[in-house]
Structure formats: structure tokens, C-alpha cells
Image (tube, rainbow, N blue to C red):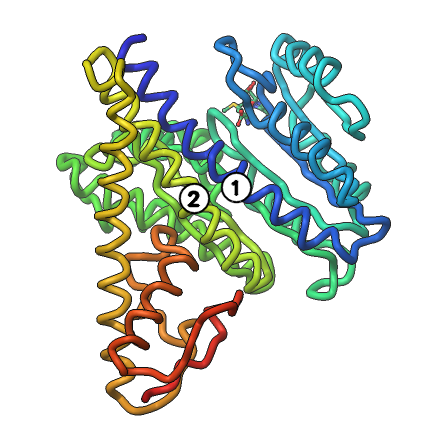
Amino acid sequence: MNNFHKTKKSAAVLKHAILDQYATPFASKTGKWSLDNRVAFIDGYAGPGRYEDGKEGSGAMLLRKAQEMAAFPRRIECHFVEADPKTAARLRAVAAAEGAGVEYTIDDDDISTHLPRLLKSAEDIPLFTYLDPCGLILPLDEVASIFERPGGYGAPATEVLINLTAHLRRFAGMLYSDKPVEASLKRMDAVCGGDWWRETWLKECPTNASEEEKMAAERAVVAGYARNLRERAGGAGTWIIDVRPRADLKPVYYLIFATRHMDGMVTFGESVSLGLQAWRKYHAEIAAEGTLFSDTGAWEADWKKQEDTLKAQWIDTLADRLTDELAKGEPFRIIDRPSVLSGLAGAARTLHFRAAIKKVLAAGKTTTNPQGVNDLWNLTIKPA
Ligand SMILES: C[S@@+](CC[C@H](N)C(=O)[O-])C[C@H]1O[C@@H](n2cnc3c(N)ncnc32)[C@H](O)[C@@H]1O
């Protein structure tokens, strides 16, 4: 396989790993009390379901989730929209072969055409919408409409995961042209919910010359997009994950997750942490390809060692920060101290927090024992 394809694949590994990690807790938690335990997933840019090499795409994955969770019981309803008829035909074949017993719909058309109807069909039940285009995503007005469900904050859980592609650069490139194609810029305005992105981009990247400035501009627009979405969704919380093929390469796309519930934020953070772990493992394996390491499987032992080092660093950092907070002499909750998490959100997860609190307990700095506590974010940590 050439590098280009490896790179593309590796980027997809992360988004699929995160979706795989998150779909189950979402359906499990939100479907516990929902009408007939129903939960809906909309996959707005669905793709073929399964790739030519047999790997699961989002389609096969969501159908599998629906089957796995049927016994809980959770009634997962999957709605797929795929504009390309040939790709939709492949998805139909995957669904026919793998979707026995699952309630699903497949529409081959533009997501914009079907979204209002699908939102209506899922009006009374928890809804997770995955929007993963290969080009520009649908306008912000339409993304925001997902959150405009009857019941406002009292509505069943409503969350979206968006792939905001790095196509942004191509459109932003026109901002430097003498003859920009205004229609293209306007498309981007619609995606972003206004023309604010033009000024934001140019402020960070005035000359289009430096790679660093382009990265900063991209980040600023992505952050602005998330802010707009939060506002339009009536005060949701968002996570932004930049997806890089390798840690030293620039992001190929950004995932933005939005939810109205703290529990959604926390659970998604756990899923990102596990997704990143799967992604590091994938990289360790391909880095070893064709070497002796690969034949003997020694890469896996090496990868585990690297993971142990990484985790020990997170635990030490967290323990140091908790110790500093405790030195102020007041009890506190981690959720109220974002600085404890700084730079580690989405990397470290509950497992590492527990180890860090235990370390601080063993050092005699706190009286709080995290043993058996599930929600460490809200646990009050008391100075000794
Ligand atoms: C990146 S791929 C999807 C990958 C898939 N979600 C996954 O995770 O395995 C994007 C898909 O969106 C489809 N598409 C593009 N524009 C669309 C639109 N306006 N409405 C629905 N599907 C669209 C493309 O044909 C393509 O198959």
C-alpha cells in the first residue's frame, strides 16, 4: 500500500475508533429511559458501509451496534443518507447482508433533502447525528436545526459529531485572489453561519505565505465554528479533535462534537481517549510493517511499553496539579478546575484520574479515596 493510502486510512481509523467507542455508551445511557428504549442514529454522509478491503465504515458499524444492543434492550434505528447512487447501492448490499433485525432506512439523495423528515421521525427519542462529508458540510443553519427539537432542553438527548474538513484551506485561498469566486465564498459563509470566518482567517494568516499561519487560521475558524454551533444549539458544549495522520503532520480534518449534557461531554472524552489509544496502536503496527518486529509481533510489546510511559506521565502530571490545588486548602471538584486537565482532555481518562488521586492519597495530601467512585469529575477532593 502506498503512503498516500496509508495516510488516508490512518485518518479514518481515528474517526471510526471514536465512533465505535462512543455509539455504545450513548445508546446505552440515553436509551435507558427513552420511549420503548428507542435511540436514533442519523449517518448523513453514509458512504458504502464497508470498504473494499473489508474494513467497517460507519454503516456496517452502526448496524452492528444496533444488533449488539438489541438484547439490552435498546432499539437503535439507523438512518443513512448517501448522495452517490453507486455508493448507496453498496451500502444497501451491506445492510441486506449484515442488518438482520435492525430498523434502518437508506436514502440516496442529498442529506439536506432528508434531514427535516428524519429529525421529525426521531422527534421523541435520543438522537445522535454523524455528519462526515468528503467536501463541505451542510450549512450551519441546517446543522443547528438538529438541536431545534420540540422540548428544548427537556428534549431527549441530542448530539452531533461533525467532520469539518480541511477543505477550508482551499476556500480560504480565494481570500487572497484579485478575482475571488464570490459564489464559492458564499457557500463557505453558509457553512460557517456568516462571513465572520473571512476576517478570522485573514487576521491569523494575512499573507497566505506561512504554513504556521495557515494552521493558526484553520484552528481559529474551527474554534469559531464550534462557538457558533454552541450558541445556535442553545448553549451546548463542544469538543474539537484535530485529526492528524501522525503527531508531526498537520490535521487532515477536525471532528467537532456537540452536546447539551455534561454527561455527554464526559463520556465523549473517555471515548476520545480510547479512540486515540486505538489509533496509536494502529500506527505502531504500520510503522513495524515489513520489519522483523512485525513478524514476531514484538511491535505490540514495544507499543505497550510506550503506552505505559505515556500513561505514567499523565498520572504524574495530574497528581502534581491535584497536589497544587490541594495546597490551597479548600475542597474542590475536578469539573470546577479546568486547569487540572489542561492539555490532557481527551488523552487521559477516568482510569488515569483514579490512579492520580490514589497517588495523592498515598502521599498524604488528600483524605479522598476514589475507589469505587464512577464519576470522578464531581467527586469532592478534600485536603488532608
Ligand atoms: C467521507 S465519506 C463517508 C464515510 C462514512 N461516513 C464512514 O465513516 O465510513 C462521504 C460520503 O458522503 C457522500 N456525500 C457527498 N455529498 C453528500 C450529500 N450532500 N448528501 C449525502 N451524502 C453525500 C459521498 O458520496 C461519500 O460517500
Residue placed at 72% from the left, 13% from the top?
A: 97
Per the image, the residue denoted by label 2 is 274
Q: Nearer the viewer, residue 157 or 197?
A: 157
Question: Residue 360 location, x and y as percent?
Answer: 29, 74
Question: Residue 225 location, x and y as percent?
Answer: 44, 49
Residue placed at 41% from the left, 49% from the top?
A: 240
Q: Quadrant of ligand 1?
A: top right
Disc 1 residue type (three-letter): Gln
Query: Which label sits on residue 377?
Result: none
Element on which disc 1 rests = helix
Badge 1: how crowded within 10 Å, few (<14), some, or many (20+)? some
Question: Residue 105 location, x and y as percent?
Answer: 77, 26
Up/down of 321 relative to 109, above or below:
below
Answer with mark 2 or mark 1, whichever residue precedes in sequence: 1
Tell whether 164 sits left or right of 251: right
CB under 8 Å between discs 2 and 1: yes
Q: Nearer the viewer, residue 156 or 279?
A: 279
Q: Nearer the viewer, residue 171 or 232?
A: 232
For this orientation, the residue located farthest to the bottom is: 329
Question: Residue 222 location, x and y as percent?
Answer: 38, 47
Query: Which label sits on residue 21?
Result: 1
